Image (tube, coloured by chain):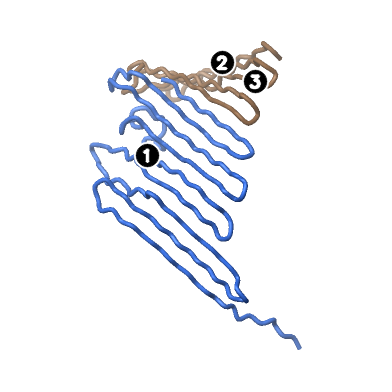
Chain colours: A brown, B blue
Amino acid sequence: MIGKSVSRIMHGGIHGRADFIHPVAGFRTQRTTQIRFSGAYRRQYQQRGSEVTLPYYWNIAPNLDATISPRVMTKRV
Amino acid sequence: MLNNEFRYLEPDYAGELHVDALPNDALAERDRARFALKHTQSWANNLTGHVDFNHVSDDAYFRDLADSVNSTSLVNLLQEGGLDYNASGGHGCAVQRYQTLQDPLAPIVEPYARLPQLTLNAQQNYAGANVAFAGEFVEFSHPTLLNATRIVINPSVSYPLVNDPEFI
């Protein structure tokens, strides 16, 4: 499975206010390590501007995991 | 902004760590950050420990940056640590305080801190009598209100008069 990746993008909107972008892409760096983007989303706020979050799930070991979510807010950076 | 969550699970300890950081917030013109650690640990001999520590950089952190009402309505962030010895009734010591996030439009009185809280429980059976002891010592501390000490001592002896039921 090394280097194999799958990706899928879904667009949806609720009342025309929000866009949910769901790219699901995974690749394995080692046999036991899996890194996956999951459930990116974009929102609009008055006090934040446009906001995009890209959660990044890292299954370090069966008993360890980390979720790193870089998040950009245009008014706050 | 970078949100980080790290979870770990081992036979003797488990926990969860959150470190969120937003350096140089352009609107608030300062650095924003959140730190949260939940950790439980157990040692041999019935000794366990726990830490639950939450801290944010400023009072408006959740109002400005959180996504859910669950988070934006948080006012008292728990900061607690303790050790428990779970044998012969259970003993424990803990320290507990809160970080209070004030809303300038609706200021509140922050809760008392327990620095520290000690509990001591014992139970023993002497010749058919149950001898039990429950005790607690708490030092309540507050930055502006009165400080107080509470001591609870509740010793008891009970002698159960129980006969075997009789049958004809």
Mark drawn on residue A33: 3
In which image quadrant can residue A51 be found? top left
- Amino acid type, mark 2: Ile
User: Which residue extends farthest bottom?
Assistant: B168
Q: Dot 2 lies on which element?
A: loop
Q: Residue at x 34, y 52 (%)?
A: B140
Number of the front mark, 1 or 2: 1
Q: Is residue B55 left or right of residue B142?
A: right
In which image quadrant can residue A46 be found? top left
In the image, residue B58 lies at what x, y percent? 31, 31
Q: Dot 1 lies on which element?
A: loop
Label 1 resides on the chain identified as B
In the image, residue A40 lies at what x, y percent? 50, 20
Q: Is residue A46 above or below residue B97?
A: above
Q: Is residue B64 above or below residue B81?
A: above
Number of the front mark, 2 or 3: 3
Q: Residue at x 61, y 24 (%)?
A: A59
Q: Residue at x 24, y 47 (%)?
A: B144
- Amino acid type, mark 3: Thr
- In what quadrant of the picture does the N terminus of chain B appear? top left
- Amino acid type, mark 1: Leu
Q: Is residue B142 left or right of residue A44?
A: left
In the image, residue B133 lies at what x, y percent? 50, 66
Tell which of B122 and B142 is nearer to you. Answer: B122
User: Which residue extends farthest top?
Assistant: A3
Number of the front mark, 1 or 3: 3
Q: Identify the residue position indicated by label 2 in the image.
A: A9
Q: Identify the residue position indicated by label 1 in the image.
A: B74
In space, the residues marked 2 and 3 are separated at their CA atoms by 23 Å
